């Protein structure tokens, strides 16, 4: 039977489909990341992002990769240029053969790609206005006269090889904005942080002999943002594990971030700030060292306050893309059951470590050289919080008491310990109701000074113990919680001691 009468060639309407694909959900920063993926796949060592927000605004991405011959460029500009089911090279960051086109045209109406390889320069362009006018899939070339005046073309021409991606005509970027200058500047600021995180392993993987990837925006080199704070000596790197899925190796590296009290302002910013500590906990999934998903436990556990210091690096090869339901934007991935089962074991182990660090700063007092007011001890069946009887404030009070008063004071300490409000404290900490120290509060500084002077009076101002107390006051609670005031406090106390001795 002849079925040709039932067949109908029905290609999609070019302008309609292209406009629809623009709404696939790319953000400005994720679109830029997709372009950089292509640069990395082309073995680029430098990626320069240039933008001009006024006049004829543009965003350009120029790399020094191996470039493409003319026929490869035409194929790269085809929508769906590669079958996502085919196995790619292990270092390839691509997937669907859509990223270059879909990411770019989600942000602009005119995409131009110029590439150089083997001394041959070729250029092609998608112009959505032309596609709409002609009602067809029209990919154009670029005249030499236009190439010469194109932004940054001269830089590409001087290189041995490389590729220039140019975005122009920003209709969506300007929509609803007071000016495209402000809108583009804001997008670039967000992109700077996004790219520093997504490609942080590429940016920090170089050596003196073999430099890693360098990404710059208008000449400013991006600094890698390491979400695990591996340079902080207080970060706990737990043993790395691995397992095999469909013959492919998946590696898992857990980290426990330091308690917030041991984070510098810079480290706290890298960790996402106080709010970001909780929001960014969870798995960090890397595909060929490129971060594609983060800040989720994949429903294996709930995000909570007591696990916010736990972060797990998960490395997956691109050969498992089909199992991870990777989306076109490479910004979301959900693990298959076999992976989830293995990850669940890791989660249970490292989350307990996060809870210990977060809820028990006192346990680490033996190693952080701080004399804490509270001690925490693990006993059979749970934990016990006890007031540190060796704290200078406690010993000073006891030295002033009579025998009967000392006995009552000890009972008071025991009653305070036994009535410690565990449940209320946990609820308040989990709901972000903890108090914040106000380092600008003059009243607090005066209270610290008054407390220190009273302790000196009890210790004896002319004794060697008083001098030791002043020298070490920065490691004694509550003084240690005000590190910015320690030096001035010591100067005032030393002045008191010198007056007494004179």
Image (cartoon, helix red, strand yellow):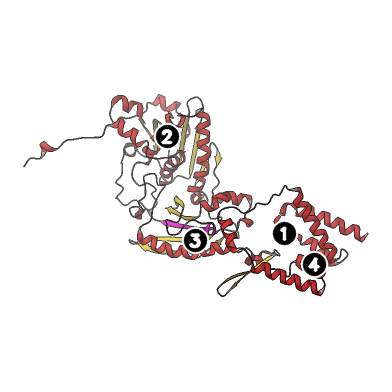
- Closer to us: mark 3 or mark 4? 4
Measure how far apart labels 1 and 2 are at the Cα level.
53 Å
Residue closer to the observer: 463 or 134: 463
The residue that label 4 is drawn on is 396
Element carrying mark 2: loop
**Who comes first in sequence, dot 4 or dot 1?**
4
The quarter of the image holding the N terminus is top left
Measured from the top left, where is residue 27 in percent x and y?
44, 39
Magenta-colored stretch includes residue 307: yes
- Closer to us: mark 3 or mark 1? 1
Q: Residues within 10 Å of mark 2 (few under 14, many from 20)?
A: many
**Who comes first in sequence, dot 3 or dot 4?**
3
Measured from the top left, where is residue 501 in percent x and y?
91, 61
**Who comes first in sequence, dot 2 or dot 3?**
2
The residue that label 2 is drawn on is 107
Q: Are marks 4 and 2 in contact (CB under 8 Å)?
A: no
Q: Residues within 10 Å of mark 4 (few under 14, many from 20)?
A: some
Disc count in the image?
4
Residue closer to the observer: 192 or 420: 420
Q: Residues within 10 Å of mark 1 (few under 14, many from 20)?
A: some
Q: Please tell me the numbered disc located at residue 254.
A: 3
Measure how far apart labels 4 and 1 are at the Cα level.
15 Å
Q: Please tell me the numbered disc located at residue 11.
A: none
């Amino acid at each position: 039977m002849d079925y040709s009468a039932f067949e109908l060639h029905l290609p999609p309407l070019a302008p309609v489909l292209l406009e629809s694909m623009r709404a696939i959900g790319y953000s400005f920063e994720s679109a830029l990341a997709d372009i950089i993926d292509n640069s990395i796949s082309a073995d680029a060592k430098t990626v320069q992002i240039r933008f001009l927000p006024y006049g004829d605004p543009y965003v350009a991405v120029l790399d020094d990769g191996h470039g493409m011959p003319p026929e490869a460029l035409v194929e790269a500009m085809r929508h769906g240029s590669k079958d996502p089911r085919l196995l790619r090279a292990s270092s390839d960051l691509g997937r669907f053969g859509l990223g270059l086109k879909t990411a770019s045209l989600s942000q602009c109406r005119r995409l131009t790609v110029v590439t150089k390889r083997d001394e041959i320069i070729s250029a092609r362009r998608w112009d959505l206005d032309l596609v709409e006018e002609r009602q067809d899939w029209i990919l154009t070339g670029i005249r030499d006269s236009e190439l010469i005046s194109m932004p940054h073309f001269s830089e590409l021409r001087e290189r041995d090889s490389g590729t220039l991606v140019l975005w122009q005509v920003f209709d969506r970027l300007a929509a609803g904005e007071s000016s495209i200058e402000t809108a583009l500047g804001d997008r670039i600021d967000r992109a700077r942080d996004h790219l520093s995180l997504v490609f942080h392993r590429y940016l920090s993987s170089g050596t003196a002999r073999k430099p890693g990837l360098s990404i710059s925006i208008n000449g400013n080199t991006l600094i890698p943002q390491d979400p695990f704070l591996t340079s902080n000596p207080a970060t706990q790197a737990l043993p790395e594990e691995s397992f095999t899925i469909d013959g492919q190796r998946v590696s898992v590296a857990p980290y426990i971030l330091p308690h917030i009290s041991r984070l510098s302002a810079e480290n706290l910013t890298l960790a996402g700030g106080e709010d970001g500590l909780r929001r960014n906990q969870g798995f960090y999934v890397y595909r060929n060292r490129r971060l594609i998903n983060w800040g989720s436990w994949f429903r294996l556990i709930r995000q909570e306050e007591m696990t916010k210091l736990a972060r797990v690096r998960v490395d997956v090869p691109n050969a498992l893309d089909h199992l991870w339901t990777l989306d076109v934007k490479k910004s979301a991935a959900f693990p298959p059951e076999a992976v989830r089962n293995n990850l669940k074991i890791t989660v249970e182990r490292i989350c307990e470590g996060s809870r210990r660090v977060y809820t028990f700063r006192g346990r680490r007092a033996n190693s952080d050289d701080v004399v804490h007011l509270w001690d925490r001890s693990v006993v059979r069946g749970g934990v016990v919080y006890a007031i540190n009887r060796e704290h200078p404030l406690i010993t000073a009070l006891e030295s002033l008491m009579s025998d009967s008063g000392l006995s009552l004071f000890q009972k008071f300490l025991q009653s305070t310990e036994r009535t410690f409000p565990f449940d209320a404290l946990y609820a308040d900490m989990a709901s972000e109701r903890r108090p914040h120290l106000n380092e600008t509060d003059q009243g607090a500084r005066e209270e610290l000074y008054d407390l220190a002077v009273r302790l000196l009076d009890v210790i004896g101002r002319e004794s060697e113990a008083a001098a030791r107390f002043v020298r070490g006051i920065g490691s004694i609670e509550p003084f240690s919680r005000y590190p910015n005031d320690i030096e001035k406090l010591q100067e005032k106390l030393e002045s008191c001691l010198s007056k007494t001795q004179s």
